[in-house]
Amino acid sequence: MKRGFLQHPQASNGSSSSTVSKKATYGPHTALVSESYANREMFKKAEMIDNQPAIRSSYGVLDNASRLPKDHDIGEFKYEVLNGATDHSDNMLVMTRIPNTSMNATPADVPGGWSECLVTGSAKRSILRTPGFPHALPSPALPVAYRVAPTPNKGLGVFATRAIRLGELIVSERPLIISPAGMDLATDCPDDFTDEQVKQASLAQREKMMEVLVHTRMHPERREAYLALCNSHLHDGSGPLMGIMRTNGFGVDIEADKGIWGTYSGVFDHLSRVNHSCSPNTIRTWRDESLSMQLFATRDIAKDEEITCEYCDLLEPASARQKVLAPYDVVCTCNACRFPGVSDLRRKEIKDFKPPALSEIFPWAMNPALPDDHLLKPLLRCAELIRQEGLEAAEQKDVSILLPMLMCYVVLGDEAKAKALQEKINLNDISENRKVKDDDPTSLKALKKGPLWALRKRMHARR
């Protein structure tokens, strides 16, 4: 077959949905291993991800023996343009603009822009049926709080142009591209292909799909932004477009495809410039109703300080974090990675800590024989470890420490500390954009009127 794509006459104009029939893939830097490879070593070594066998895509420098033969034909990539269609089968891959716009639209025509998407039919329908979609993007406060600038040793990064407060929205952005994080393994490879050559053929096939998404469908201004991003996969067989996707993608949570495709990846103009830290000062959230990602400050950020986020599980040991970061060509030199002896122990203690359930508050409150800090002392220790490790981002993802701490101060009748905790919980409750109102039963005003307020003081007074 001829190399390259069959160019459909409608591909460059009209409102667009291009469809491709493909199987499911799972997870970042992974490839689904079908039963057609059951006799290969790769099938035996596959990991189970979302109950499907999958292998990790290669990274680093590819040796010559693993490269594809020069005469290997990747073949044509066929696709069909279906203008305005939404009745795609659940597992069919669809190339589509979301929010739906004309192929002739410019970024100035669509506030917040749009995303070129490679998603399944079920995911597309789920997004379009989200209540309120397409909701306007949340707007950060002015003036703009960041700039993109060179770092000493990490290429470009994002820096604060002014002081940024805890809980402040810094960036709000739709992805340039949304695509499955993983890929299918090519199933039409010669029997004498090594496992690595099968991976290389698979990367080459995905590159062809990316060529349509980027070079045929993207607006020139958004294409320029995509191509300007870093590519850390120059030597592992990834094409230039897949290399950028693998380097810069953040996971986006599309609920409809849980268990079908698993994970999608979004590449952003500005957010993808934010570098990793194991003690980050921001947290990312994803919102289906606006098809956008937001970046919030998890602590106060000083002017000119670098804005960072996490690329991995922050509570894993330094050695495990470095393995996860390797495919992104990231060698973290933060204090937690440079001095893992103390940091790993702290992070393990944070990870293993079991905060008291709210149901434990009342029995403690009613038992004056127990010390006043019986529940509070371990909570305060965990909070201090979080502060020492700079893990406010992890704390924001899980307010299980903050809520029982607040209730302890309520029971103790400590209004100043309860108020401070309530304000912190308000700032932490960013993923749902919800702030506690005075008439809310969990507000401090309501709690002060409830039976738990200063209960310990009353119990002590009865003794």
Image: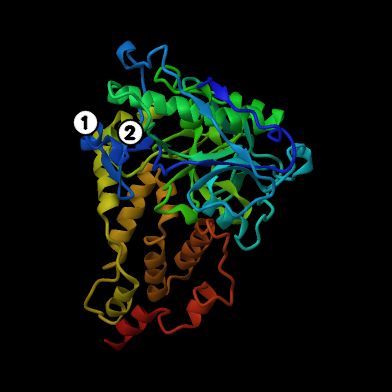
Residue position for label 1: 41
Closer to us: 61 or 112? 61
Numbered circles on residues, count:
2
Give coordinates of residue 156: x percent, y percent: 55, 24
Nearer the viewer's eye, disc 2 or disc 1? Answer: 1
Which colour assignment does the render follow? rainbow
Secondary structure at badge 2 equals: strand
**Which residue is depicted at the point 36% across and 84% down?**
458
- Image quadrant of residue 324? top left
Closer to us: 90 or 119? 90
**Which residue is depicted at the point 46% across and 20% down?**
153
- Image quadrant of residue 14? top right
- The three-letter code of the residue at mark 2 reads Arg
Residue position for label 2: 56
In what quadrant of the picture does the C terminus appear? bottom left
Secondary structure at badge 1 equals: helix
**Residue 73 located left or right of residue 357:** right
Q: Residues within 10 Å of mark 2 (few under 14, many from 20)?
A: some
Residue 406 higher or lower than 183, as above or below = below
- The three-letter code of the residue at mark 1 reads Glu
Most extreme residue toward the bottom, as rendered? 462
Closer to us: 327 or 457? 327
Closer to us: 240 or 155? 240
**Which residue is depicted at the point 59% across and 55% down?**
87
Give coordinates of residue 94: x percent, y percent: 56, 44
